[in-house]
Amino acid sequence: MENKRYSIAIDGPSGAGKSTIARAAAKELNFVYVDTGAIYRTVGCQARRLGADPCDAEAVAALLPGLDITMAYGDDGLQRMYLNGEDVTEEIRLPEVSMYASRVSAVPAVRAFLLEMQRDMARKHSVIMDGRDIGTVVLPDADLKIFLTASPEDRARRRYEELVKRGTPQDFDTLLKEIRERDYNDSHRAAAPLRPAEDAVLLDTSGNTFPQSRDQILTIIRERLGL
Ligand code: DC
């Protein structure tokens, strides 16, 4: 008999620690971790490179036919992103690309373009997929849905510390403002706004250390899926 494939959807606002927590949980369970934000970032990256106005839905949609996005997993388990064959894994993390990604992700044609790519991953592997609309749109039949959040201040602080560690520090207040702006954009857009699925388990990681959040999520997963 074929092994059952599990799908776990993790949604929530930016900076809640979704990717770090989801990646650690996937490693522990031997699931594939899919960072869907990185896919939207790759579209944003192309818009930025070509000077397309990311708020102009038609201009953004016009980029799609020339866009080949692929991903691959390194030996370290890290998801690398390729844009028309070029590795853009680092470039998509630039702060300017974050804003482009947020804008292009509001374009329905972009969401439709990326939908099958995401579903395909869940058909082929046991996945922990993180994003904004995984439990509501991409994998409505996921075995488990988790909505992971934290206060804006907590998220800005984590982002601040991450950037200091990377050697590219940024002003805390600017980061907080950007996080609030992106939250607003992500949850007020007409296409697949950020919201918890009705059957999602809510997990607020404010004030948690990383090991606490990781252990909490693993407990939820094991209890719910009987693993
Ligand atoms: O998770 P992230 O910050 O890397 O995501 C980048 C942008 O992509 C963010 O503004 C929201 C958007 N996004 C989305 O609309 N749907 C997803 N499933 C994942 C990300």
Image (cartoon, helix red, strand yellow):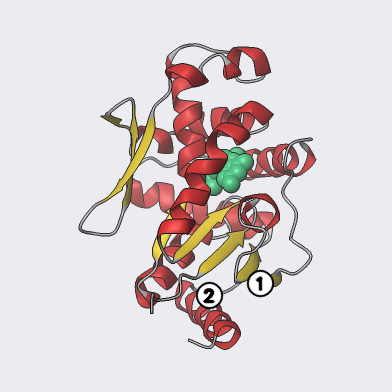
Q: Position of residue 72 (x, y in %)?
A: 30, 46
Task: State the residue in front, 36 or 156.
Answer: 36
* Residue that lies at the very extreme toward the front in this rendered image: 1
- Contact between marks 1 and 2 (CB within 8 A): the answer is yes
Task: State the residue in front, 93 or 11.
Answer: 11
- Residue 227 position (above or below residue 41): below
For image coordinates 53% across by 56% down, the residue present is 130
Task: State the residue in front, 107 or 210.
Answer: 107
For image coordinates 79% across by 35% down, the residue present is 190
Q: Position of residue 73 (x, y in %)?
A: 28, 52
For image coordinates 65% across by 63% down, the residue present is 141
For image coordinates 45% across by 42% down, the residue present is 38
Is residue 21 visible from the viewing direction of this image? yes
SS type, badge 1: strand
Q: Which residue is mark 2?
A: 213
Placement of the N terminus among the 4 image quadrants: bottom left
**Left or right: 207 with respect to 123?**
right
Disc 1/disc 2 C-alpha distance (Å) = 9 Å
Check disc 2 and give the amino acid type: Ser
- Residue 108 position (above or below residue 46): below
SS type, badge 2: helix
- Residue 120 position (above or below residue 129): above
Q: Which residue is mark 1?
A: 203
Please count the marks in the image.
2
Q: Position of residue 54 (x, y in %)?
A: 60, 20
